[in-house]
Image: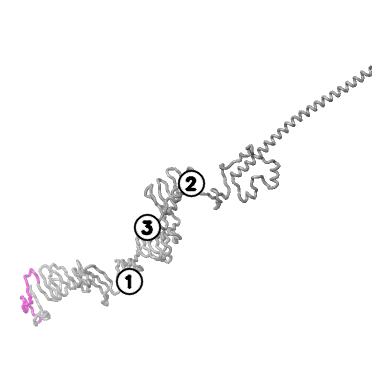
Amino acid sequence: MRTKIKIATLAMMGLGLTTYAQEFNQPVKVNNQFSVFTTPSTNGQLMLLRDTAANGTNQSFGGLKFSSASGYDFVLGKFSDVGTGKFQLRDQNNTAYFTILPGGNFGIGTGIPYGKLDVTGLGVFRATDNSNGLAFMLANTQGNSAFTMRAFTNKGQIKAENGLPLELLSDDGKTLFYGQNGGNVGIGTTSPKKTLHIVNTSSFEVGIMESPNQQGSNLRFIDNANTPVEFGSQLGDAVIRTNSEVRLVAKTGSGNIGVGIAAPTARLHVNDGKVLVQPKNDNDTDIFRINEYRGGSLMSMSETGDAGVLDIGYYGLAGDKVQINGGVSNQGASIGGFDDGVKKFNLNSKGDSYFNGGGLAVGTTNLGGYQLAVNGKIRAKEIKVETGWADFVFYEDYQLPSLEAVEQHIKEKGHLEHIPSEKEVAENGIYLGEMDSKLLRKIEELTLYTIQQEKKIKSLQEQKTVITKQAQEIENLKKQNAVLKSLLTRVAQLEEKLDSKK
């Protein structure tokens, strides 16, 4: 095998040779520095500068080439395989270190670069210093820096330059990440409206939700059934929605919280729903509690056994309260009122009830000094009144008014003595116990009058009997007298006859 060197080429390389097209068939040494020589044919060519195809091969070169028997140590210049021209640097195992294709693609570690820069294997870009940390930069067609990757001593950095946004696209061109100049970040959108704006039409979505009737931004979750749950704001209010309906809202201005209502009118407004509080055991205290503004309890719901207990209004003194007990072990429910720990009234659904806290008004707010004031009708099967009674009428020293005196009082006053008039009853009412006693007095007086009359009647009846008997006797006497008269008449007639006969 021969090593051929064109002298003109070497002359251009500054080797001091001027003869053109001279061939050297033996090793050549120029200026004791540059040597061209051959080795045994089994090792192949060590240096070749040529632009014609090698005999019996499909390869051609235009440049400089070092080689060994098994491959190519170094190739510099145009090299072609099967008619495709490229510029390469290869090792002795024929592995490409870098490749430049005719179209301009540049490959490192690959013989077939698929882009303008194709690095196969570990790629390292080193910064010039740790202060700047510049390791990798992409620029636009005007040469302006558009994208940089930096590695500092204490951090790594990816940065979009010159006010440009930072965008990450999927294979189908959809925006996966969009960093807007100014700090807004978009996922699935190139127009992020907030610090984080995520848009996704799949089964899971987190992002800003906007519509004319909601006017807010939300953190939105959508499950596989396409049911959205949204956490966010609406006109400044904190809102939780499901199926686009407001389930919970916290108003910014008033601080009111609404459950199932978008416009709560109280600190807690539950609309069209139920509130369930589950105790942890059968004797759990303060399951639900409302405090006075200074911290004392105003209302507390607890559980005693299997009964619910509600205490109301005992700030500062647990003994002052109203207690509602749902009933334990079939004992019945009760409502009790305590004053300094003493129960003043108790209403029981099973057993006795009592009220010992003062007067009781029904249908009126004016007790008028009474324990019970009722403005209306009262119905009862039996009423017991404890009061004084009128048995003194039957005492021997009681002066029973004469009927003439009674009659005179009625004529003057228009009512019985000791009995209130109609006007007095209309103005002041009556005391049942007192009135019953007064009525009893009159009944007892009437009883005495009746007894007196009965005695008189009996006396008259006795007199009548005597008179009747006397009349009968008189009648009998009259009859006897008539008989006697008749006898006397006959006797007289007989005497006259006797006398005439004489």
**Image quadrant where one finds the N terminus:** bottom left
Asked whether residue 58 is in view, the answer is no
How many numbered marks are there?
Answer: 3
> Which label's residue is closer to the chain start, 1 or 2?
1
The span shown in magenta is 20-45
Estimate the x, y position of residue 368 in percent, counting from the top left.
56, 51
Q: Which residue is at the far top?
A: 502
Marks 2,3: beta carbons within 8 A:
no
- Nearest to the observer: residue 342 or residue 295: 342
Which of marks 3 and 2 precedes in the sequence? 3
Residue 25 included in the magenta stretch of the image: yes
Q: Secondary structure at mark 1?
A: loop
Residue carrying label 2:
347
Quadrant position of residue 136: bottom left
Answer with the quarter of the image where residue 450 lies: top right
Horizontally, is 6 left or right of 208 in the view? Answer: left
Q: Please tell me the numbered disc located at residue 182.
A: 1
Residue lying furthest bottom in this view? 18
Q: Residue at x 44, y 45 (%)?
A: 327
- Mark 1 vs mark 3: which is more N-terminal? 1
Q: Kindly identify the amino acid type of the residue bearing the numbered disc 3.
A: Ala
Give the x, y percent position of residue 89.
15, 71
Cα separation, mark 1 vs mark 2, equals: 70 Å
Q: Nearer the viewer, mark 1 or mark 2?
A: 2
Q: Which residue is mark 3?
A: 225
Return the residue nearer the eye: 21 or 251: 251
Spot occupied by residue 426 in the image (x, y as percentages of width and height): 63, 50
Q: Residue at x 12, y 68 (%)?
A: 92
